[in-house]
Amino acid sequence: MKNDSVENFKDIINKDKTGKNEKELSEYLMSKLSKDQTNELNRILKDEKALNDLLSSEKAQNILKKLTGGKNG
C-alpha cells in the first residue's frame, strides 16, 4: 500500500460507517495499491486456498480486529 497514515485509514473507515458505500471504499483502497500489488491481490482473491491461508494468518487476524474494533464480523 502506498503511504497512508493510520489516521487516514481510520477516516476512511469512519466515512464508510457514515454512509460511504463498500464499492467506493473498495475502489479507494485499490487505488492505493501499485499495479503489482493489485495483480497479486487479484490472484489471491481468485485462489480459495491462498485466500484462506492469508485470512487465517495471525497478522491478518490482528488487522481485522483493529478494523472492526475487536468485534467479530
Image (cartoon, rainbow, N blue to C red):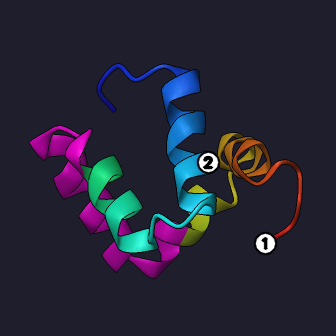
Asked which quadrant contains residue 52, the reply is bottom right
Q: Which residue is drawn at the image coordinates 79% and 49% (left, top)? A: 65
Quarter that holds the C terminus: bottom right
* Dot 2: element: helix
Report the Cα–Cα distance between label 1 and label 2. Answer: 16 Å
Q: Position of residue 29 (x, y in %)?
A: 35, 49
The numbered mark, 1 or 2, whose residue comes first in the sequence reads 2
Does the stretch in magenta take in 41? yes
> 45 and 2: which one is in front?
2
- On screen, residue 37 above or below 23: above
Does the stretch in magenta take in 37? yes
46 to the left or right of 19: left
58 to the left or right of 34: right
Q: Position of residue 56 (x, y in %)?
A: 70, 60
Q: Position of residue 18 (x, y in %)?
A: 60, 60
- On screen, residue 10 above or below 20: above
Residue 73 — which label? 1
For badge 2, the amino acid type reads Asn
> 33 and 5: which one is in front?
5
Q: Nearer the viewer, mark 1 or mark 2?
A: 2
Quarter that holds the N terminus: top left
Considering the whole magenta stretch, tell me its main secondary structure. helix
Other-residue count near label 1 (Cα within 10 Å), few / some / many at <14 / 14–19 / ≥20: few
Specify start and end residues of the magenta stretch as a single range: 31-51
Residue 64 — which label? none
> 30 and 36: which one is in front?
30
Q: Which residue is drawn at the image coordinates 70% and 52% (left, top)? A: 64
Instruction: State the residue lying farthest toward the right.
Output: 71
Residue highlighted by disc 2: 14
- On screen, residue 14 above or below 19: above
